[in-house]
Amino acid sequence: MEKLDLTKRYKSYYSAATKPELIDVAAAQYLSICGKGDPSDEGFASNIAALYTVAYVIKFMCKAEDKDFTVAKLEGLWWYNEEQYKNVSASATPVQVPRSEWYYRLLIRLPEYVNAAHIAMGITTAIEKKKVVAAAHVELYLINAHRAVQMMHIGPFDKEAETLQQMIEFMQQNHLPKNGLHHEIYLSDFRKTAPDKLKTILREPTI
């Protein structure tokens, strides 16, 4: 049985240049969980744990069906109350909007053959057998095909504003309006990787 590795199957999705570029992103399905607050808070860690618990339950269900896959990289959509922080420039938001005020939707991409029944059973198993109560908030989430400006950010998360500024300037120069939530793909395991070595794809959906 060949194991499906989404990072190899969809290489362009999990790669980016170190300068802004306009790309086309295909539609995909994800496991998802929402929250609000500082990523260093216990709630954020709890949500990540719930998401991965369900993902691995689904993985082993599919493996039993001869459709094994590698659990994909963690991703996140991020947003905040723009009316409350309307005087903060887009590039300054990572620094000037308190982390406690950010909303997020954590994501793990799923193979196309994973269906609603797999997900429902994965959530039930995580709650009842793994005792992961937060798994009750895990759900299926779809992202439609769209265009986006992306760039590879190398370094700590608190330096993302510098990369984001380059992306915003590129969008302004090319008349590309923002059209969706800020998207991040975490290529590095931030629990095990030195901050200056972290690799994160930053995406800003556009028209």
Image (tube, grey):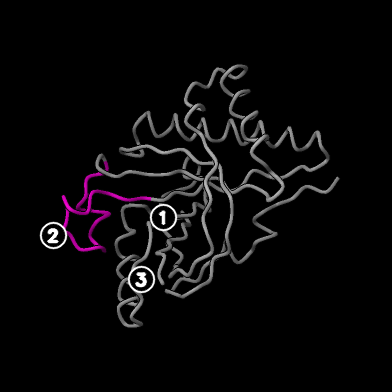
Q: Secondary structure at mark 2?
A: loop
Q: Which residues are magenta?
A: 78-99
Residue 146 at x, y percent in the picture: 49, 66
Residue 120: x %, y % from top left: 61, 31
The amino acid beneath tag 3 is Met
Which secondary structure lies at badge 1? helix
On screen, 57 above or below 194? above
Closer to the observer: label 3 or label 2?
2
Q: Which residue is mark 2?
A: 87
Whole-angstrom CA distance, mark 3 to mark 2, is 19 Å
Residue occupying the far left of the picture: 87
Q: Nearer the viewer, residue 15 or 55?
A: 55
In the image, which is nearer the foreground, mark 3 or mark 1?
3
- Name the residue rendered at 70%, 59% in the picture: 9
Residue furthest out toward the front? 116
Looking at numbered disc 1 in the image, what kind of residue is underneath it? Asp
In the rendered image, which residue does mark 1 sit on? 196
Is 197 placed left or right of 158 in the picture? right
Residue at the spot 44% in from the left edge and 49% down from the top edge: 76
Residue 173's x, y, as percent? Answer: 32, 82
User: Of discs 2 and 1, which sits in the foreground?
Assistant: 2
Give left or right: position of 98 versus 22. left
* Quadrant placement of the N terminus: top right
Residue 164 lies, in percent from the top left, at: 33, 65
Task: Classify 10 Å Cα crowding around label 3: few (below 14), some (14-19), many (20 and above).
Answer: many
Q: Earlier in the sequence, mark 3 or mark 1?
A: 3
Quadrant holding the C terminus: bottom left
Q: Is residue 162 left or right of residue 44?
A: left
Residue 98 inside the magenta-drawn segment: yes
Q: Which mark, by number, is residue 167?
A: 3
Membership of 114 in magenta stretch: no
